[in-house]
C-alpha cells in the first residue's frame, strides 16, 4: 500500500488536495509551525526550511491529520482512488482485467486531481480579484474581474466542495457534466498568466 500511494501521489499533490495553497514554485506556508511566509518546499517529498519538517507524502498526511503512517496511507489511497493489494506490489502479474480496471481508475483519479487543482487555482485568483478590484466608491464602475469573481466564486467553491466531500458516483457525474466548464476555467487561468485578462470585457 505504501509504495502504491507514494508512486501515485506526490506530497505537493496531497497538500493541494487538502487545501494548502502551493505557489508555482512549489512553496507553501508550513502547516507544522507558525509560518507567515512560505518556507515549505513541496515536490515528491516535502521539506520545511523553517522547522525542518521533512518526509514523503505519507509522512505529510500522517502529521497533517494526526494519523499513524498506516492510517495516513489508507486515507490517501481512499482520497486519491488508489488501488492496492495487501502484501503484493501493485499492477504486477498476469491478471488482465483487474490491471485494466486499476489503470482506468488511476486515470480517473488523475483527472479528478487535475480538475481540483484548476478549481483551487482559479478560486485563489478570483479571491484575489475580489479584493484587488473591488470598487472603492459607490459610483465607480465595476471592473470585469471584480464581476467575474462575484459571479463565479460560489460556483467554483461548490464544485470543489463536491469533489472533496461527495461519494464517487456524484464526483464522476459532476466531472462528466462540468468537464467543459472546468476546462474553460483552465483556459481563463492561462489567459491571465499570459497577461491578456482585462483586455477583453467579455468575461462571462
Ligand atoms: Zn515548518
Image: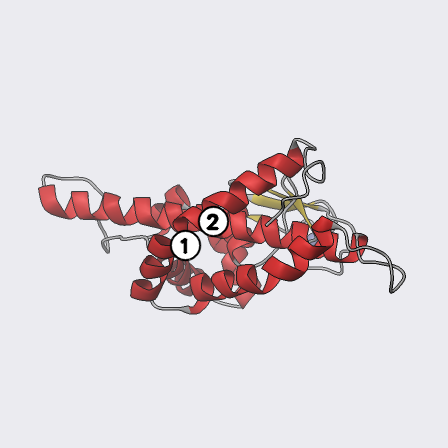
- Say if mark 1 contacts mark 2, CB within 8 Å: yes
SS class, disc 2 = helix
Q: Is mark 1 within 8 Å of ligand 1?
A: no
Left/right placement of residue 110 relative to residue 101 reads right
Q: Nearer the viewer, residue 187 or 58?
A: 187
192 relative position to 167: left or right: right
The residue depicted at 32 percent of the width and 63 percent of the height is: 168
- Image coordinates of residue 56 in percent, x first then y, are 51, 47
Residue 60 visible in the current orientation? yes
Q: Locate residue 62, reporting x and y percent.
A: 50, 61
Q: Which residue is mark 2?
A: 182
Name the residue at the top extreme: 194
How far across and down, in percent of the image, does residue 16 sit?
55, 52
Up the image or down, 23 lies above or below 136; here it is above
Residue placed most toward the observer, 13 or 65: 13
Residue at position x 75%, y 49% from top?
Answer: 50
Q: Position of residue 29 (x, y in %)?
A: 70, 53
Which residue lies under the disc numbered 1? 178
Calculate the distance from the C-alpha at mark 1 to the C-alpha at mark 2.
6 Å
Residue 74, compared with residue 119, is above or below; it is below
Amino acid at each position: 500500500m505504501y509504495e502504491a500511494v507514494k508512486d501515485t501521489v506526490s506530497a505537493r499533490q496531497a497538500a493541494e488536495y487538502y487545501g494548502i495553497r502551493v505557489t508555482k514554485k512549489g512553496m507553501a506556508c508550513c502547516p507544522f509551525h507558525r509560518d507567515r511566509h512560505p518556507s515549505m518546499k513541496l515536490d515528491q517529498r516535502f521539506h520545511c526550511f523553517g522547522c525542518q519538517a521533512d518526509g514523503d507524502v505519507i509522512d505529510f498526511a500522517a502529521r497533517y491529520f494526526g494519523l499513524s503512517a498506516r492510517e495516513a496511507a489508507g486515507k490517501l489511497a481512499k482520497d486519491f482512488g488508489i488501488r492496492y493489494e495487501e502484501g503484493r506490489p501493485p499492477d504486477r502479474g498476469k491478471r488482465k482485467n483487474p490491471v485494466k480496471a486499476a489503470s482506468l481508475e488511476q486515470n480517473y483519479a488523475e483527472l479528478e486531481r487535475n480538475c481540483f487543482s484548476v478549481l483551487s487555482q482559479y478560486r485563489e485568483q478570483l479571491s484575489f480579484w475580489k479584493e484587488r478590484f473591488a470598487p472603492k466608491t459607490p459610483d465607480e464602475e465595476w471592473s470585469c474581474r471584480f464581476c467575474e469573481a462575484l459571479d463565479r466564486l460560489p460556483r467554483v467553491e461548490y464544485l470543489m466542495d463536491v469533489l472533496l466531500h461527495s461519494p464517487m458516483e456524484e464526483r464522476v457525474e459532476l466531472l462528466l457534466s462540468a468537464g467543459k466548464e472546468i476546462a474553460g476555467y483552465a483556459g481563463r487561468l492561462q489567459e491571465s498568466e499570459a497577461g491578456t485578462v482585462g483586455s477583453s470585457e467579455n468575461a462571462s
